[in-house]
Amino acid sequence: MASQEILREEPSRGSFINDPKVRGIFFQAVVVIVLVALVWWFVQNTIDNLTRLRIASGFGFLKSRAGFDISDSAIAYSSDSTYGRAIVVGFINTLIVAGAGIITATLIGFILGVGRLSHNWLIRKICMVYVEVFRNIPPLLVIFFWYSGVLSVLPPPRESINLPFSSFLNQRGFYFPRAVWGEGSWLILVALLLGIAMAWFVARKARQRQMATGQQFPVFWTSAALIIGLPLLAYALSGFPLSFDYPKQSTFNLTGGFQVKPEFLSLYLALSFYTAAFIAEIVRAGIMGVSKGQTEAAGALGLRPGSILRLVVIPQAMRIVIPPLTSQYLNLTKNSSLAIAIGYPDLTATTGTVLNQTGQAIECVLIMMVVYLALSLLTSVVMNVVNARMALVER
Amino acid sequence: MQEHDLSFVRVEMALAQSAPSSERGLGAWIRKNLIASTGDTILTIIGIVLVAMILPQLIGWAFINAQWIGTDRTFCATVAQGGIQPDGWSGACWAFVNAKFGQFMFGRYPIDERWRPILVAILFVALLVPLLIPKVPRKGLNAILFFGALPIFAFFLLVGGVFGLPHVETSLWGGLLVTLTLSFVGIAVSLPLGIVLALGRRSKMPIVKMLCVIFIETVRGIPLITVLFMASVMLPLFLPAGVSFDKFLRALIGVSLFAAAYMSEVVRGGLQAIPKGQYEGADSLGLGYWQKMGLIVLPQALKLVIPGIVNTFIGMFKDTSLVSIISMFDLLGVVKQNFSDPNWATPQTARSGLVFAAFVFWLFCFGMSRYSMFTERRLDTGHKR
C-alpha cells in the first residue's frame, strides 16, 4: 500500500535535461538565435555595401526609363518604356512560351506514352528510344541544339524553304500567313462561345437523360456541329470578314505574314520535346497502374474497346497521372527561364538586364522569386482542383 | 468374374511436338508484333517510313559523311563556304571535336598540369568501381576513402599551391572536369542536407519545421537560374566589403542547396511510407531520436526511395549545365564557347559539338539510371506491393 502511494505521488522522472519538451524549446531557441544573428549580419553587410555602392533600395527604379530594346514583345514596348513594363513584357513572354510548351509537351507525351504500351513492336521501340534519349540530355543542350545546330544554319531569307500553306522557314524564323479579322468578326467569336456553351448544356442534359431513362444521345456529333457550325454560320452571315496576310519574298527579307523568331521557336521546341519524354513515362505508369482486371471486367460487362478506354481505363489512369503531371508542368515553366541562354526575352532575361543596368540586385531577384513562386502556386492550385475532381471517392 | 484390363495407362511421355508453324518463327513474330490488325499494319508502315526517313540520314551524317580528321574549318566546309567538301555535303565534323577534345575535358586547365585531373579521375574510377560492385568486400573502408580522403586529396591536387604544385585558379577549370566536380560535390552535400531537411520538416518542433518548409518550398518554386543568380549577384552583397567568394564555390553552394530541397522531398516520401509501428517499436526499445532514425527508420526509408534519389542525382547532373549561363565553362559551356572559334566556324561545327556533349551527358545519366534499377532489384526484400 505504502509503496504504491509513493509511486503515485512521485512518478520516476529523469533529469530535467532529458525532458523532450525542454530539449525541444532549447534547440529551437538556439536555432532562432543563430538565424536572427545571421540575418542581422547579412542585413548590416547589405546596408553597408549598398551605401558604399550608392544604390538606393526600394522599387522606385521600376518607374524610370528602361532604355533597352526587347526583340519579342506581345504588348507595346519601346526603349522609352519603364523598367516595370520591361519586366511585364518578360513575364508575358514566359507565360506564352510556357503555355505553348505545356500544350505541345502534353500532346507529344501522351502519344509517346500510349505508344510505349502499343502491341506494335516497332512503335514501342521508336517511343522507347525517344524517351531514353531525351530524358538523359540536359534541356539547355536541347535548346542550344535547336538554336545553334538547326535554326541558325538554315538558309538566309532569300533562299527560304517553302512549306505548305505559303509558310516559309529561314534563318530569321518561321513565317506563316496571318489572319486579318475584318469588320464583324466579333460575331464569330460570340458564335463560338455560344456553341461551346450549348454543347456543354447538351452534354449535361444528355447525361441526365441517360441516367434517368438509359437512352443515349449522340453528344459528340451534336457538340461538333454546334462548335464548328455556329461560327461558320456567323462567318457567312457577317459577310466573310476573314482574309490572310501572306508573307512575300522581297529583295532581302520576307515581308508580311506572322514571324516566329528562332529564339522562341528553339525554346518552345526544346521544352516541348524534353518535357514530353517525362510526360510519356508518367502516362505509361498511369496506364500500367490500372489493373488488368478492370479492363477484363469492363469487357465482361459488354463494353466496346473504345468505351473501355474512355469510361474505365482513362479515368483511373488520370488519378495516377495528374499529380506527377503537375510537377512536370511546373518544371517546364521553371525551365523556360533557360531562355536567357539564347536571348529570348522572358522574365529572367529581362529582369536580368534590368538588374545589370540598375544594380538593384535584391529587388530584381525578389521580383523573379515572387513571380515564379506565384506561377508555381497558381499551377498547383489549378491542377489540385482538377485532381480533386478526378480523385477516387472512397467510402 | 473375369478381370479385363481395359484401361489404358500411358507409360512413357508423349513426344513434345513443336508449336504449329503459324505460331513460331519469324513469320509468326511479324504477324503478332507488326501486322496483327489493319490498324497495326498502318502503324507499322508509319513507323517504317519514320525510321527510313531518319535513320539513314542520321547514320550518313554521323558516320559515312562525317569528317574525322582535319586541322581547321576547311575540312568541314563545302567549296562554297571556302572548304574542301563538295557542295551540298552534310556530315558531322568530328575533326572539330577531336581537335578540341582536351578543352572539352579540362577547359583552360594548363596543359602541363593536366596530369592532375587525370590522376584524380583515375583514382575516382578506381575507388568508385569497387564501391558499385556489391561483391567486392570492405565497403566501409572504400566509402571512407571515396567520400572522405578522395575529396581532400583531389582538392589539394586540383587547386594546387601546396607541395610545390603550381596554383591553378578555378576560373581556368572547365569542361567535363567542372561538370563532374560540381555534380560530385552536389551529390555528396545534397543527400545528407536533404535528409536533415526532411527530418526537420517532419519534426515536432514548430519553428524548425516552419523554417524547413519555407526553405524547401521556396527553393522548389523558383528556377535554378534564379538560385544561381542569387548566388552570383546577391551573395557578395550579403558579405562584408572585401570578402569575396570564389565564383566556382558560389555555383557549388547554389547547386547543392537547390538539389538538397528536391532531395528532402524525395526522402520525406520515404519517411512517410514507413509504418507507424516502426517508429513506435523503436521508441519502445528506448532508442533516442537519432538512434531511432539512424538505425530503424532511415535505412528502410532510403531503400524505398532509391529511384527518386537517383532521379534527383540525374536531374542535378543535367542541371550543372546551367552554370554556363553565369559564364562558367562546364562541358556545355566550353562546347558553346568553341563554336565561335573562327578557325572552326562552319554550319556543321555547332551540331557536331553539341551532339558530342549530348552523348557524354547521355552516357552518364543513362548509366546512373541503369545502376539504380540494378540496386533496386538487389535491395528488394519483397516488401513491395
Image: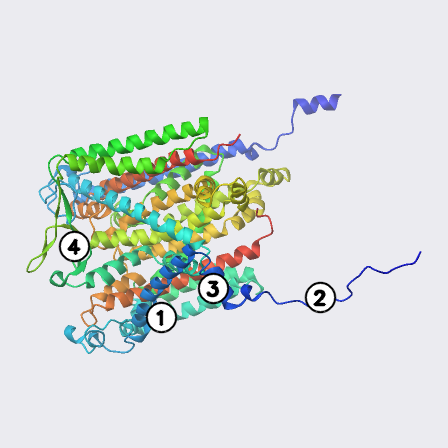
Q: Which element is circle 1 on?
A: loop
Q: CA separation, marks 1 and 3?
A: 68 Å
Q: Which residue is mark 4?
A: A166
Q: Amino acid at mark 1?
A: Gly
Q: How far across and down, in percent of the image, does residue A135 sit?
A: 38, 56
Per the rendering, the mark at residue B30 is 3
Labels 2 and 3 touching (C-beta < 8 A): no
Left or right for A111, reference B273: left
Judge whether B372 appears above or below B297 on screen: below
Q: Amino acid at mark 2?
A: Ala
* A158 vs A270, nearest the viewer: A158
* B382 vs B131, nearest the viewer: B382
Furthest residue toward right:
B1
Q: Are discs 1 and 3 located on one and the same chain?
A: yes
Labels 4 and 2 touching (C-beta < 8 A): no
Q: CA separation, marks 2 and 3?
A: 30 Å
Q: Residues within 10 Å of mark 4 (few under 14, many from 20)?
A: few
Q: Which residue is mark 1?
A: B164
